[in-house]
Image (tube, grey):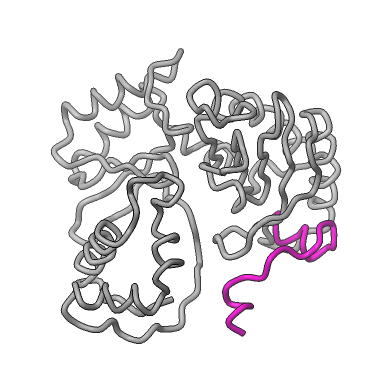
Amino acid sequence: MIGFVAPERLLAVAEAVVTAQRDLGDRSDRKLSRLKYTIDRIGPAAFKAEVERRLGEPLQPARAYAFEQAGDRFGWVEGHDGRWHLGLRIESGRVADRGTRRHLSGLHAIAQVHDGDFRLTGNQNLIVANVAADAREAIDRLAAEYGLDDHRRAPVRRDALACVALPTCSLAMAEAERYLPDLLDRVEALLADHGLSDAPIGLRISGCPNGCSRPYLGEIALVGKAAGRYNLMLGADACGRRLNRLHRENVTEPEILAELDRLFARYAAGRRPAERFGDFLLRSGLIAAASPSPDEVRT
């Protein structure tokens, strides 16, 4: 935590951070190229001073904050200028025509009538942005026609993430993106058996421990160990403030589904109103406490 940024200074501060990393970081070596390695090498105070030098002013003191949600907002969201933004679920970020879901053709059709812009999100989804109010109906119709309305499906499917894994990534030890649809079918069936179809649960799969789908922030996560085998990670919170922890190591799909079935049954019977799955697992003692949250560390 290095300070507070007013909305009107956000882009200037972002540019200062990016250019500081460009000039001070080591982009020649992929293993050392991330910002965290630069900060580890020179220290947070030095990096903050460099950002402020490029910005031309000191950052304001940090302010108290609380996360109330994480992830993308789906469906129509009204902007501050009277225009609208449509959040669309794109499974694994893969824009393609596959069966009845013709995402590539659908986005091409929307582009023909849309005078705003398209934005990609950090959760593999897409926003049709800056839509005039009188254009919403036509875009809604195209989204439904081409199967671009996956954001209306069950929450666990809508929010799931997977890395590309096999066959694209040479580091992958197990399937992720290609396995996600089948896994979601089975997890949704388990949730339905326990009356939990509408429960929002964050599920993520990574083909290896490098975790490009950010599995360690999933309430349920599978981290690839070998073909058909995963570490089952459980217990993150919904807002990215708490990491999950290893629950079962090097297990197969039948073992994973059997364990989830047991835990879903406990969740259905013992959850509090609006209590998320990851929070329930921790409160009920079904998993041990994971790493402390940033708030707990500061306390």
Residue 276, position in %: x, y?
Answer: 67, 57
In this rendered view, identify the residue nearer to me: 41 or 297: 41
In this rendered view, identify the residue nearer to me: 54 or 287: 54
Taking 83 as reference, is 80 above or below it? below
Q: Report if residue 297 lies within the magenta region.
A: yes
Position of 129 with respect to 273 (left or right) is: left
Position of 228 with respect to 52 (left or right) is: right
Q: Which residues are magenta?
A: 277-299
Residue 18, position in %: x, y?
Answer: 27, 59
Location of residue 242 by image quarter: bottom right
Position of 190 with respect to 242 (left or right) is: right
- Residue, x 40% and y 47% (percent of image)? 122
Q: Report if residue 204 lies within the magenta region.
A: no
> How many numbered marks have been drawn onto this rendered protein structure?
0
- Residue, x 29% and y 79% (percent of image)? 49
In this rendered view, identify the residue nearer to me: 184 or 255: 255
Residue 140, position in %: x, y?
Answer: 32, 34
- Residue, x 30% and y 19% (percent of image)? 105
Name the quarter where the C terminus is drawn. bottom right
Residue 178, position in %: x, y?
Answer: 56, 23
Location of residue 206 by image quarter: top right
Name the quarter where the N terminus is drawn. bottom left
- Residue, x 20% and y 41% (percent of image)? 117
Position of 36 with respect to 191 (left or right) is: left
